[in-house]
Amino acid sequence: MNNLKYYEDGLAYDFSMFTPAEKVAPSKKGKIIDIPEEQKKRALRRKKAASGLSGKISVILATVFIIGMLGGNIFLRSQITETEQKITKMEKQISLAESKLASVNFKMEQKLSYNNLEEAATALGMRKLSKSQIVYIRTNQDNKAVLGEGELSAENN
């Protein structure tokens, strides 16, 4: 069977992709293009300048970043220190207010003590209640509570 007939004829299927590949002999020169020495030197100088510049820029950026981080750290530490000082000041004010409150409570308890009340009452001419001052009232009616308008509010049978 002649396969070339199928490769060359216009059949429904394309068998050309299954044909053996032709070997291409590599050329001795290849695709190498010689660049004149001046252009090589210029390109090398540009490359060195670009690498030196990028190195300098990266060093400058790293330095700016580190300085920024240190500055931020110092700023935050100063904020923390100021806040701690405010807290300490407030705590001192709270302890001072608590001590004043304790002092005022102590003075009030002294003034309202039972002995002080008795002394003040005797100084005003008051005396203790005696049994002769108590008056008992007896009624024959059930226990009733009468409002000011004369209505009965509660009865106890």
Image: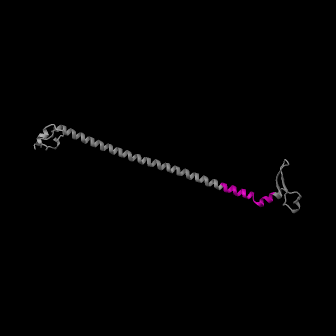
In front: 68, or 29? 29
Q: Is residue 132 left or right of residue 29?
A: right
Q: Is residue 44 above or below residue 98?
A: above
* Applied colour scheme: one colour
Q: Is residue 4 magenta?
A: no
Q: Quadrant of the C terminus?
A: bottom right
Snapshot quadrant of residue 35: top left
> Percent x, y for residue 1?
10, 44
Residue 72 in picture, x, y percent from top left: 44, 47
Q: Position of 120 compared to 23: left or right?
A: right
Identify the residue at the far bottom of this view: 131
For residue 123, above or below residue 150: below
Q: At 80% from the left edge and 57% from the top edge, which residue is drawn?
A: 120
Q: Position of residue 50 (x, y in %)?
A: 27, 41
User: In percent of the image, x 33 and y 45: which residue is there?
Assistant: 59
Residue plotted at (70% across, 58% down): 106
Residue 111 lies within the magenta run: yes
Q: Where, by quadrant of the figure, is residue 9 drawn?
A: top left
What type of secondary structure mainly makes up the magenta span?
A: helix
Q: At which x and y percent is residue 63? A: 36, 46
Q: Which residues are magenta?
A: 100-120
